[in-house]
Amino acid sequence: MSKPLILVKLGGSLITDKTKPYTPNIEVIKRLAKEIHEAREEKDFNLILGHGGGSFPHVSAKKYQTQKGIINGDSYTGIAKVQNDAAKLNRIIIDELINAGENALSIQLSSCSISENGRIKYMYLEPVKALLNDGLIPVPYGDVGMDLKQGCCILSTEEILNYIARTFCKTELKPKKIVVCGIVDGIFTGDPLKNPETELIQEITNENIKTVGNYLAGSSGIDVTGGMVHKVERLLEIAKAGIESQIINGLVAENLKKALKGENVNGTIIKW
Ligand code: IPE
């Protein structure tokens, strides 16, 4: 029996300042890396750690409208810049994971996957499997993707983790759960950063998804991948395949560590 596998996403707004271009939240990144390392010392599990792009690739992605595909001659410059900007943030994350004592390696989706209308059609997963087999941490991240229909697209971390989870679902690598870390406690009935009256939704299931769909507005700051609606849709798809997700607040110290260790954390559970 292989070790349980947990998929994690560190949201772009958690690890960068989404209001200031190219600004990492370095103290937050360091703390999260330390929590991951401590959790892995205390409990035996495998991890795929995805992360968003925040104020790094979203700037060029927005400028060149990369999510729309190749729309004019400048789109090619956009593809190169988005890949470069996403990779710069990824290097910072990898650096801090290594500093914290973890053997983490980048997985660059623009180089190992192909998409169709913004959905990953194929991703070469053999290196990810080999890394997991050796107890290393593969780190995929929101990236530009080459797309068979529209030329290029933006691949969110949720789309990447969704593909990995669905592919691993019927194997012994079936993920135990997905933990998504953001800057608020979970999914709310409105935008908690703008309206303090909004309430946390503890659970999203097939029963309340219609009502929740009405609540989901765009996320704060810049976002080209469709905000919270897109992210919850991708997590719901995985829930249907039998894998629960948990959305938690990564700004609260120890939350990620507790979630990784299977301890109770305030947040929103997405299950089917
Ligand atoms: C998109 O990734 C990153 C790019 C624009 C290339 P995500 O959708 O996972 O990133 P965040 O969490 O919204 O920043």
Image (cartoon, rainbow, N blue to C red):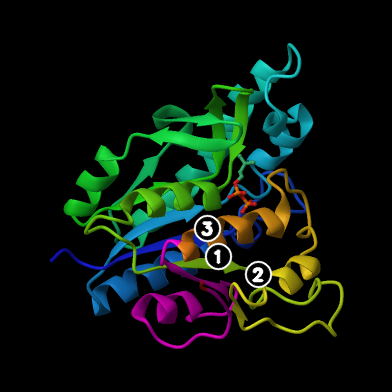
Read off the residue under disc 2.
Answer: 183
Q: Does the CB distance between marks 3 and 1 fall below 8 Å? A: no
Q: Classify residue 170 by image quadrant.
A: bottom left
Q: Which sits earlier in the primary sequence, circle 3 or circle 1?
A: 1
In the displayed structure image, the side of residue 42 where residue 77 appears, left or right: right
The image shows residue 203 at horizontal and vertical percentages of: 59, 80
Q: Classify residue 37 by image quadrant.
A: bottom left
User: Gap in Å between the C-alphas at discs 3 and 2?
Assistant: 23 Å
83 to 258, vertically: above or below:
above
Read off the residue under disc 1.
Answer: 27
User: Gap in Å between the C-alphas at discs 3 and 1?
Assistant: 33 Å
Looking at the image, the residue that sits furthest to the top is 73
User: Which residues are the magenta region?
Assistant: 241-270
In front: label 1 or label 2:
2
The image shows residue 19 at horizontal and vertical percentages of: 77, 53
Q: Residues within 10 Å of mark 1 (few under 14, many from 20)?
A: few
Residue visible at 43% across and 61% down? Answer: 241
Q: Which sits earlier in the primary sequence, circle 3 or circle 2?
A: 2
User: Gap in Å between the C-alphas at discs 1 and 2?
Assistant: 14 Å
Amino acid at circle 1: Glu
Frontmost residue, 233 versus 2 = 233
In front: label 3 or label 1:
3
129 to 154, vertically: above or below:
below
Read off the residue under disc 3.
Answer: 237
